[in-house]
Each structure stands twice: as C-alpha cells, then as structure tokens.
Image: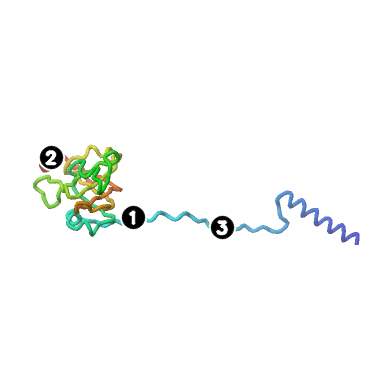
Amino acid sequence: MKKLHIISLAIFTVLGFSAIAGQSVYSQTPVKTAVVSAPSAPQIQYMNVNALELVSNPYKYLNRNVRIKGKFDKFSTLGLDYPAAMRSHEKYISFMIQRPDITNHNIPLSELKIFLKKEVAEKNIDLNAGDEIEFTGKVFSTALGDPWVDVDNFKVVNKVQKDDKKN
C-alpha cells in the first residue's frame, strides 16, 4: 500500500509541476484554425450607356449605375442648388460633355446634369473642350425630365492636342 501511495504521489507531483509550467503530460497536437477573411464589398455593376440614349429615356435609368464616355465641354454651375435634385455649390461642380451627334461644332449636352465633387474637379482643372473622358455614376433624379448623375469615378481617357481640336 505504501508503494501505491508513493507512485500516486509521484504522478500527482509530475502533473502538478507540468500544470505550473504550462505543459501537459498528454501529447499536444496542433489545432488548425480556418482563416476567415472579411467578405469583400460587392462590386458595383455599371451599364455602358450612350449619352443621347440616357437623355432620351431618363426614367429607364433612374437609380441605375451608368458608365458614359464622351468629350468634355466645360465645368459649369448648371443644376446646382436646384431644390428638386439638390446638389450644393459648396461641395459640387457640374460639368457638361459635348453632344456626340454634332461633330462639326462644340455644342454641350445641357440636358444631362452631371455632378462631380469639387475635390475631383480641382484635380482635373486643366481639361479642355474636346478632351475624351469616361465617368461612372448613379442617375439619382429625373427632375425636369432630365437625367441627373452623381459621378463616383472620373478619368481622362485622352487629352487632345490643341491642333487636333475642332472649333
């Protein structure tokens, strides 16, 4: 009996020291944990739209994300601070693109109301009429029967040399 008591005491002592040292007398196998990454934000899908089609059928594109290519005409204040589709002149500037159906003159497509945040516009202040641009955005209103677009991405595709510009 004394021998059994000593063996039991020895086992409890080893277990006690192992617990204090943070070790287990049992074999440890590494536990694999799955790495879970946060889901990526869904990509916004844009419809390639001809500017004249958008102007002809603004209600068809209301609350839709669109991508438009065109020729820059000028920065403007057209449509700013209009209560039915409010975009403040303090945060936004509007711009116009040239009518794609007129090639021998620079005529703005004023029916299309396009709004750009001022910070983005300031980075593109050197744009000239005829420079090719592409922008994406959401048609947020059809006030006055016209499409009103908030731009979320704006890029210059091609800067036209002054000699190449048509007056």
Tell me, what colour scheme is on the image?
rainbow
3 and 2 marks in contact (CB < 8 Å): no
Residue named by callout 2: 163
Q: Residues within 10 Å of mark 2 (few under 14, many from 20)?
A: few
Label 2 secondary element: helix
In the image, is residue 155 above or below residue 30?
A: above
- Quick one: quadrant of the C terminus? top left
Label 1 secondary element: loop
Q: Amino acid at mark 2?
A: Asp
Q: Amino acid at mark 3?
A: Thr
Residue 1, located in which quarter of the rendered image?
bottom right
Front in this rendered view, residue 91 or 71 = 91
Front in this rendered view, residue 158 or 111 = 111
Q: Residues within 10 Å of mark 3 (few under 14, many from 20)?
A: few
Front in this rendered view, residue 44 or 35 = 44
Q: Is residue 51 left or right of residue 152?
A: left
What residue occupies the far front of the structure in this picture?
83
Q: Tag 2 or tag 3, which sits nearer the N-term?
A: 3
Q: Is residue 15 left or right of residue 73?
A: right
Q: Residue at x 15, y 51 (%)?
A: 100
Q: Amino acid at mark 1?
A: Ile
Q: Mark on residue 44?
A: 1
Q: Tag 2 or tag 1, which sits nearer the N-term?
A: 1
Label 3 secondary element: loop
Q: Position of residue 31 (x, y in %)?
A: 60, 58
In the image, is residue 67 above or below residue 159?
A: below
Count of all numbered marks drawn on residues in the image: 3
Give the mark toward the camera: 3 or 2.
3
Q: Residue at x 25, y 43 (%)?
A: 81
Q: Alpha carbon of mark 3 to alpha carbon of mark 1: how far? A: 32 Å
Give the mark toward the camera: 1 or 2.
1
Residue named by callout 3: 33
